[in-house]
Every structure is written in C-alpha cells, then in structure tokens.
Amino acid sequence: MSPAAVRPPMPRSRPRTVVVERLDDHARLPFRATDGSAAFDLASRRAVTLVRGVVEKVPTGLKMRAPAGTFLEVRPRSGLAARGVLMVNAPGTIDRDYSGEIFVPLTYLFDGSYAIRAGDRIAQVRVVAEEPTRFRTGPVKPRPSRSGGFGSTGR
C-alpha cells in the first residue's frame, strides 16, 4: 500500500466569522459568485455614475468587523477593470478597529461615463490573517540586482 493511501484526510478548520451590519434592507451581504471564488463580492448600495478622472467613494451599505487576528482586504474586480473601471487604492485594507461603512473608491478611465446600478458587484473582500511582526533597526545589505526600485526586474 502506498504512503498516500494510508494518510488521514486533512482536518477541516472551522470557518471564520465576520460580523456584518446592514445599513439598510437593500445592502447585499458579501457572497461568493462560485464555489471556487477566492473572495466574496461586494455590491454597490446605490446607483453611481463614474466619469473619467473623478474618484467616487461607492457605498456598500455594510459595516464589517473582522475576527481577532485578521483584517479585511478589499480588492478590485477584473471584470470591471476590463471595462475601464479601476479601484483607486487596490488593495484596500479595512483595519479591525474600523467601524464605519465600507466604501470602494472607483474611477473610470475612458471618455464618457460608466453607470453602476444599486446591487452591482463592485469589489471583492477577503479575510487575511495577521502575522506576528516586529521591526528592528539595523543595516540592510544591498543586493545589486534588486536595488533599482520601480521596474528593477525588467519588463
């Protein structure tokens, strides 16, 4: 019998729970579009028209609190990016101690405008585990091949 055949199955961890408050009955809870989705979709609370060069803070109608030891990360949707709609500060970090409504800053790249309807998917959110981290002072030894900054790895 091969070693793989006698290994016990990996234990399933309990799902984390994010506390979500709806600010009105029309706000959509975060949801996965498919079983294989890596993140949960966020929807717009209201209709918004995006115009080129203007950043709109699009409301979700949700407040969220991440579980202890985690934070929330808001990421853009590739389907919107393909249409010229960009999330300005991607990814966005929602600190565990933030208690206000979640907004998604969006802008439009092309001439004209882009209409977002209430309930349209505008971003994704995922739970990210915090790593215990400390910073200390000390010398940082340069690595000549990677000290050039932006674009230092080539095209």
Image (cartoon, rainbow, N blue to C red):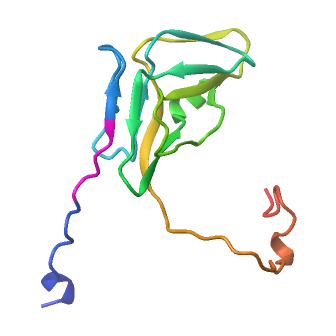
Query: Percent x, y for residue 132?
Result: 50, 68
Query: Percent x, y for residue 100?
Result: 48, 29
Figure quadrant of residue 64: top left
The residue drawn where x is 66% and y is 22% is 107
Q: Give the side of residue 129 with respect to residue 116, left or right.
A: left
Figure quadrant of residue 88: top right
Query: Percent x, y for residue 71?
Result: 46, 49
Residue 16 in the magenta stretch? The answer is yes
Q: Quadrant of the N terminus?
A: bottom left
Q: Quadrant of the C terminus?
A: bottom right
Residue 101 showing in the rendered view: yes
Q: Foreground: 68 or 147?
A: 68
Query: Percent x, y for residue 141?
Result: 82, 81
Residues in magenta? 14-19
Q: Foreground: 151 or 92?
A: 92
Relative vertical location of residue 150 with respect to residue 107 in this rendering, above or below: below
The residue drawn where x is 59% and y is 21% is 57
